[in-house]
Image (cartoon, helix red, strand yellow):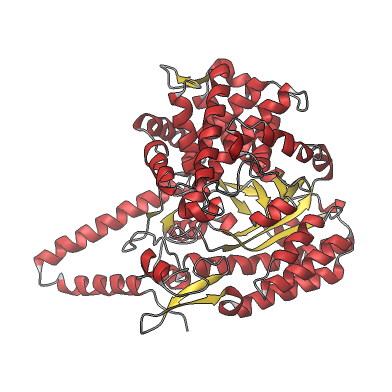
């Protein structure tokens, strides 16, 4: 039996009562009119917002795969679909009951894109009648629990990655591990990965799939993370499990389920291999005081390019990820490094369908010649590499930066990766290790900021780009022409980049959460002028993001 959303049921009941009362009570007619007006307003909102997404088919050349690899792909996609269902349970478990009350197909489609009734690319604005603000706790914590309540409790796993906090009838808090709470689904996904492992011809992939299958049913992901980093010769890959913390807006502690199914682009991957070995040297050159750059980044990392053929769960909600830097475990990062996965087909779709049209509207016409896909690819790639630079432990004895900054960590870390990625590009160009013109990288980066600020204040990436935009503006890195286009000042762009790099690494190293919150309030905002420019893009019908047609039918595998 499906559980009914109480809020929705209440609203539906009120509608019936109001409808009956209107026969005898004139006041209720006004109430009904107001109710209908609100519904019409939300309907208009949905109609407009649904148009911000451009459909893209996720495909790859399956003829490059072996017969066994073509058999493995459907198994990986099935496992990914389970992660999708689990993310729904975390983000909005009342999906089915809410969908059953909605008659309009566009609203249903928009709800599915957003994994709930809140617009993820517009500050989590509710778009279904009777739905209130999105709770910061999601389903990771009891709805009526305060932050202080958990802090003062004796729960051992207060801020655990892989558990949910529950409250019993006496008010006592406890934690329930994911592998127990979602035992049935995780066992099914584990079984699918085991089946895929039996077919795997690559030894590294076989080992990883088996270990990841075990991890899903134990919540112990360390061994599978190391095995994933050890894979070198695989053609297929799957990133799967509870991974990112964005959905937990209360503590930024608990992980959400997601999956990417990937096919390696060997030609592009080969081009990227040389950069990871340069990380220690780049670390030493960071524009910040020496005490903030004493850590040595791992160099056993890999840079790979992939065609992504399936997104599921957290990574498919709201703005779509086009590059991934994992694992997130700081200990593994320092001991072993990370893998930076560039999702080339999704990246190209965003460049062609979003970034180029934005540039034509908002970048100075004399600088349009510098908008370039290779520069976009490199900026995104080095963003992911830059997650490995900087500082992981505070210098003030507050532990890991992530623990010290809690819910303020993600957006600042994304901002760090943005600006340090640009620092890396600049440094490598000067050393002759990267080809291209700095004007291409800076101008394309500027267009990229204008693309990403449209993700809004609810997104870590949106906040990061708003901070960058405002900081660069204050430091003269660009000017806004009278015709509303933006023109990069290339010399000042580099200076602003170095200043912002130093500021962010210092904030992280100090672990001063209050200082980060102050920067968020002052810098991570969209000004009236910028919003007006962004509104032009919407009026021109330029999409904000992409949604996917994906799966075995699109790929042509069974």
Q: Horizontally, is 132 left or right of 208 in the view? A: left
Foreground: 323 or 554? 323
Foreground: 347 or 174? 174
Instruction: Write the residue at 31% across / 52% down.
Output: 41
Residue 220: quadrant of the picture: bottom right
Residue 115 in picture, x, y percent from top left: 50, 61
Residue 448 vs 458, above or below: the answer is above
Q: Which image quadrant: the C terminus?
A: bottom right
Residue 337 in picture, x, y percent from top left: 73, 50
Q: Horizontally, is 87 left or right of 206 in the view? A: left
Residue 418: quadrant of the picture: top right
Q: Horizontally, is 444 left or right of 1 in the view? A: right
Residue 462 vs 399, above or below: the answer is above
Residue 44 in picture, x, y percent from top left: 36, 50
Residue 182 in picture, x, y percent from top left: 58, 76
Residue 349 vs 139, above or below: the answer is above
Residue 360: quadrant of the picture: top right
Q: Horizontally, is 186 left or right of 524 in the view? A: right
Instruction: Write the residue at 24% across / 72% down.
Output: 14
Does the rendering let one see residue 53? no
Residue 364 vs 123, above or below: the answer is above
Q: How many marks?
A: 0
Does the rendering let one see residue 261? yes
């Amino acid at each position: 039996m499906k559980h009914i959303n109480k809020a929705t049921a209440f609203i539906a009941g009120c509608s019936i009562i109001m409808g009956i009362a209107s026969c005898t009570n004139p006041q209720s007619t006004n109430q009904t009119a107001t109710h209908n007006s609100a519904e019409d307003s939300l309907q208009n909102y949905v109609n407009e917002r649904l148009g911000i997404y451009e459909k893209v088919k996720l495909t790859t050349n399956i003829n490059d795969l072996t017969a066994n690899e073509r058999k493995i792909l459907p198994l990986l996609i099935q496992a990914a679909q389970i992660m999708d269902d689990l993310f729904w349970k975390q983000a909005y478990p009342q999906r089915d009951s809410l969908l059953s009350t909605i008659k309009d197909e566009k609203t249903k489609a928009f709800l599915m894109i957003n994994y709930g009734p809140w617009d993820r690319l517009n500050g989590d604005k509710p778009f279904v009648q009777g739905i209130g603000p999105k709770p910061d706790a999601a389903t990771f914590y009891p709805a009526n629990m305060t932050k202080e309540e958990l802090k003062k409790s004796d729960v051992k796993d207060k801020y655990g990655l892989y558990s949910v906090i529950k409250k019993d009838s006496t008010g006592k808090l406890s934690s329930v591990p994911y592998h127990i709470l979602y035992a049935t689904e995780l066992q099914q996904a584990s079984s699918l990965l085991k089946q895929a492992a039996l077919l795997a011809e690559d030894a590294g992939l076989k080992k990883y799939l088996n270990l990841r299958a075990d991890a899903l049913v134990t919540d112990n992901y360390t061994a599978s993370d190391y095995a994933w980093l050890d894979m070198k010769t695989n053609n297929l890959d799957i990133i799967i499990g509870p991974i990112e913390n964005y959905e937990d807006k209360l503590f930024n502690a608990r992980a959400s389920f997601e999956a990417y199914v990937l096919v390696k682009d060997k030609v592009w991957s080969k081009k990227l291999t040389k950069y990871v070995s340069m990380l220690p040297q780049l670390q030493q050159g960071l524009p910040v005081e020496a005490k903030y750059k004493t850590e040595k980044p791992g160099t056993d990392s890999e840079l790979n390019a992939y065609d992504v053929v399936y997104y599921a769960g957290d990574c498919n909600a709201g703005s779509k990820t086009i590059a991934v830097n994992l694992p997130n475990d700081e200990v593994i990062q320092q001991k072993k490094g990370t893998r930076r996965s560039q999702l080339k087909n999704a990246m190209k779709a965003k460049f062609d369908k979003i970034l180029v049209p934005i540039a034509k509207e908002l970048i100075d016409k004399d600088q349009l010649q510098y908008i370039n896909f290779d520069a976009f690819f490199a900026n995104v790639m080095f963003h992911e590499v830059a997650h490995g630079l900087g500082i992981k432990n505070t210098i003030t004895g507050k532990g890991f930066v992530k623990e010290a900054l809690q819910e303020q960590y993600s957006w600042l870390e994304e901002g760090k990766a943005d600006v340090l990625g640009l620092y890396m590009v600049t440094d490598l160009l000067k050393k002759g290790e990267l080809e291209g013109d700095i004007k291409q990288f800076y101008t394309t980066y500027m267009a990229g900021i204008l693309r990403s600020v449209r993700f809004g204040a609810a997104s870590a990436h949106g906040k990061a780009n708003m901070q960058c935009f405002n900081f660069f503006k204050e430091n003269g890195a660009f000017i806004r022409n009278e015709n509303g286009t933006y023109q990069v000042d290339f010399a000042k762009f580099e200076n602003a980049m170095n200043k912002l790099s130093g500021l962010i690494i210092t904030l992280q190293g100090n672990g001063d959460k209050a200082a980060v919150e102050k920067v968020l309030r002052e810098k991570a905002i969209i000004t009236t002028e910028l919003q007006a420019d962004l509104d032009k893009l919407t009026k021109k019908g330029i999409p904000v993001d992409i949604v996917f047609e994906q799966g075995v039918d699109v790929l042509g595998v069974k």
